Image (cartoon, rainbow, N blue to C red):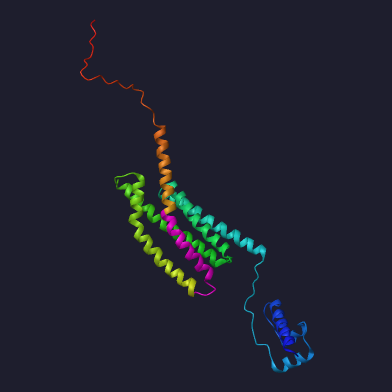
Amino acid sequence: MSDDAIQALAKGIVDYRTAHSGLIRSIDELSGVPGMKPQVMNVLRAQAFAGNFAIRSNSVVGPRIGADLRQQAINVVLLALGAMLVYIAFRFEWIYGVAAVIAVFHDTIITIGLFSIFNKPIDLTVIAALLTLVGYSMNDTIVTFDRIRENLRMQVRGSFTQIVNMSINQTLSRTVLTSGLTFLTALSLFLFGGQVLNGFSFALVVGIIVGTYSSIFIASPILVFWMNVSEGRKRAARPVSATPSRAKMPAGAKPIRTVK
């Protein structure tokens, strides 16, 4: 056989193996390869053999199962956000819960969007990473909100915006240090964890970055915006005094006395 014929036959064997789940159970199966000649089969039977193997598990995720898995992931994340909204509204105020949930929802959407951009698969490990991200980002936001509530209880002087800004500055070092160390751990998993942990670690790397800035630049500004709007409504709803204003008397003028 010529070199071109041998290369064509080798390519046919590789294509045959790919079409049959990447497995060749016996040499006799190669007789079905296009272009295979009896002389070549005799040589393969005499000088080659198929290695032993055992199929431990075999699973195929079709479009139907993939759609169900995606819907379950969405339902789990929404359920977690709803439970956190109720808890935060009970412990703080409802607007605190809304602001925190919006920030966490923002983190989740950006993380899933990057999975779509880089064409990465979403499996059970990625769903676990998303739930981890939800809890981590929510905890970071709650730390800032708790400091805001503490400063309000201490009746710190200043407007609500100034109190929020001061609270963010007080917790900023803790946020940066904690997020930075966690980011380094997740980055190590992403770089050296192998293909199995690639999706999980990628979600954590992206989520930690997004969750850190959303706790500072999204959750707290939403809270400030709502409080300013609420204060403006309260001022607009206050009754206007009906007492007429007295005109000022010119300098040196004396009041006129009426004689009865």
Looking at the figure, which quarter contains the C terminus? top left
Q: Which residues are magenta?
A: 193-216
Residue 238 in picture, x, y percent from top left:
39, 31
Residue 255 in picture, x, y percent from top left:
23, 14
- Residue, x 42% and y 55% (percent of image)? 215
Judge left or right: residue 51 versus residue 131: right
Q: Residue furthest top?
A: 260
Q: In this rendered view, identify the residue nearer to me: 56 or 251.
A: 251
Compared to residue 106, the image places residue 190 above or below, namely: below
- Residue, x 43% and y 66% (percent of image)? 183
Looking at the figure, which quarter contains the N terminus? bottom right
Compared to residue 7, the image places residue 97 above or below, namely: above
Q: Residue furthest right?
A: 38
Q: Residue furthest bottom?
A: 46
Residue 56 in picture, x, y percent from top left:
62, 78
- Asked where in the image residue 242 lies, by quadrant, the reply is top left
- Asked where in the image residue 122 lies, by quadrant, the reply is bottom right
> Total of numbered circles in the picture?
0
Q: Principal SS element in the magenta part?
A: helix
Asked if the magenta segment contains residue 197, the reply would be yes
Q: In this rendered view, identify the residue nearer to me: 13 or 27.
A: 13
Residue 170 in picture, x, y percent from top left:
33, 55
Judge left or right: residue 73 versus residue 162: right
- Residue, x 53% and y 55% (percent of image)? 79
- Asked where in the image residue 179 lies, by quadrant, the reply is bottom left
